[in-house]
Image (tube, grey):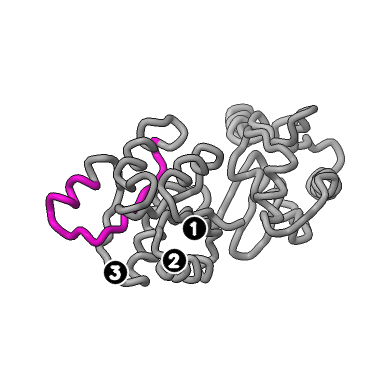
Amino acid sequence: MAMRIAVVEDEEALGVLLRYNLEAEGYEVDVIARGDEADIRLREEVPDLLILDWMLPGLSGVELCRRLRQRGETERLPIIMLTARGEESERVRGLSVGADDYVVKPFSTPELIARVRAMLRRAKPEKVSSQLSAGDIDLDRETHRIRRAGREVKLGPTEFKLLEFFMQSPGRVFSREQLLDGVWGRDIYVDERTVDVHVGRLRKAINRGRQRDPIRTVRGAGYALDEQFTAAKPAAVKSRDSAGSEPRL
């Protein structure tokens, strides 16, 4: 499940270059050529990181950055600003309106990629970490192994991505459309009923006997990883330590 990066850049050749190199690193990339269009798109969906050109048609990068910092949903969005302006006063101006980093054109693509990685590690550690845990479920992104209460769970690639997607945002309710975008991708047409099929397969694989179902169905809204299930593991450990015996689940 790739992290999403929005690139707001009106130079077509540079936009193509950035898309190519970022997608080669495994990111999903959305290139937008106008500042006013980006303002609208970022209201609809917030990416994991924004690469923003200073000079844009419709709305300048500086003004867009200022607006993003005034909105609750984007006030912490990581922003790297690209500009041909290298003077100290201009760098200070870009940072003062809310940019997290500043890269002067022409720039080294490997250096920009390294800055993107570093910023995402700080801002999205839950997405970068190779290990995810929720309740008694442990997921390893590198080995693609899943264990529940010590038992190894075998999942198909789609069910693995689905569980990973849920574990990144415990408690959040995702609609079927959001799950299709996040797990299958926007460029692939899949019927929404397919989500129900794969959620059913995921439940069948991870639940055994009287184990609690970690996937919560929200009628009319979608599915979520139950936040109460996520918090169950620390409570169970405390109960075992204090009573000297295995906790009842």
Q: Earlier in the sequence, mark 3 or mark 1?
A: 1
Please give the name of the residue rendered at 68% of the width and 37% of the height, measured from the top-left corner: 174
Q: Earlier in the sequence, mark 2 or mark 1?
A: 2
Amino acid type of disc 1? Val
Q: Which residues are magenta?
A: 75-94
Circles 3 and 1, Cβ within 8 Å, touching? The answer is no
Is 200 rendered above or below residue 249?
Answer: below
Q: Earlier in the sequence, mark 2 or mark 3?
A: 2
Whether residue 105 is visible, yes or no, is: yes
| Residue depth check, mark 2 versus mark 1: number of the one nearer the observer | 2
Q: Quadrant location of the C terminus?
A: top right
The verdict on residue 79 being magenta is: yes
Disc 1: which residue: 31
Which is nearer the eye, 123 or 96?
96
Disc 2: which residue: 12
The verdict on residue 20 being magenta is: no
Please give the name of the residue rendered at 19% of the width and 52% of the height, measured from the top-left corner: 91
For numbered disc 1, what is the local secondary structure?
strand
Mark seen at residue 107: 3
